[in-house]
Image (tube, rainbow, N blue to C red):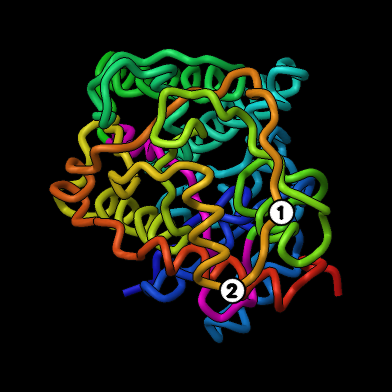
Amino acid sequence: MQTATILVTGGAGYIGSHTCIELLHAGFKVLVVDNLDNSSEESLKRVEQITGKTVDFIKGDVRDAQLMASIFADNKIAATIHFAGLKAVGESCAMPLEYYDNNVNSTLVLCQAMEKANSKNLVFSSSATVYGDPEVLPLTEDMPLSATNPYGRSKLIIEEMLRDLPESDKLKKSDNPWSVALLRYFNPVGAHESGKIGEDPSDTPNNLMPFITQTAVGRRAELSIFGSDYDTVDGTGVRDYIHVVDLARGHVKAVQKLLSKDGIDGVQAYNLGTGNGISVLEMVKAFSAENDVAVPYKLVERRPGDVAACYADATRARVELDWVAEMSLEDMVRDSWKWQSLNPDGYTV
């Protein structure tokens, strides 16, 4: 039986590179397309070192319709995992048009190429931001959706766009209908246990953990904690932090479900989180305690678009995908520090 090929857009990025490792471990072939705007080809070289397997790589932009058409024409793609896109809440408020172009337009071009090639199994990298500012926690997939910032709105627009595809199948009486998993994940942290790959933002980080690790390693004088007056355990924002390896394995489980005999009927959303809310201060203290390293910090004003608390109910993923987050807070902070301490300047070689 021929090994199935999985196309991974944005596969050189933080979550994408970890997912490539788990796909290769699971026996899939991996084809990555990435424009390297906020990632490094070095990450894929290290994926190959870790796994002892080859990653096929094409440098390019998913918005390039001609490129995407040629990729599907030249390769038999069993399923696509779509990571490519911009992902910073604060930045999206300052440059919304770039976010709609990059995130929404890339998905449109990708889906057009997939439909033309009759390759209609898709795992979409969505986000818990589609729940907006939730009134009830934990979050379940059937809760009302909204967005508090352009980044979240771009994900919500894409989810709605993808939900239209099975309806078009019915009208066309398609014998190969769309099968789509929307993975709404929460706050990825951590790194591969080898310390060879991890989160390496090209400029100012957008997520909490790179700020912590870069401060700990001396690249930053102190950590800014945005907001200390939220209605939370210590006034700082509460999030559902999930180890990136757990998250990557969730994508593999989704691909396996798409390709299984029962598959996914149409479009289904899945939360990928631990179900545990951890405050920013709790994360900083856990990092310092586990790694015996100081992280100087200051409390500053809230960021626009942030919410007080957000954490998941991931029951559906456990029941339907046979997936559950297994790695602890200690794993998250230990692996994050191992990556940063071994690679103080990231992928710079």
Spot occupied by residue 56 in the image (x, y as percentages of width and height):
63, 67
Residue 31 drawn above or below residue 133: below
The residue type indicated by label 1 comes to: Pro
Spot occupied by residue 153 in the image (x, y as percentages of width and height):
54, 17
Check residue 313 in the rendering and tell me which mark sits there, or answer none: none
Check residue 292 in the rendering and tell me which mark sits there, or answer none: 2
Position of the N terminus, as image quadrant, is bottom left
Task: Report the Cα–Cα distance between label 1 and label 2.
Answer: 13 Å
Residue 160 drawn above or below residue 226: above
The residue type indicated by label 2 comes to: Asp
Magenta-tinted stretch: 176-198
Can residue 239 be seen in the rendering of this structure? yes
Residue 189 drawn above or below residue 3: above
| Residue 104 location, quadrant | top right
Spot occupied by residue 155 in the image (x, y as percentages of width and height):
51, 25
Residue drawn where x is 81% and y is 64% of the image: 218
Which residue is at the front of the view, 101 or 283? 283
Residue drawn where x is 68% and y is 24% of the image: 301
Few, some or many C-alpha atoms within 10 Å of disc 2 (few <14, some 14-19, many ≥20)? few
Can residue 119 be seen in the rendering of this structure? no
| Residue 185 location, quadrant | top left
The residue beneath circle 1 is 296
Which residue is at the front of the view, 112 or 152? 152
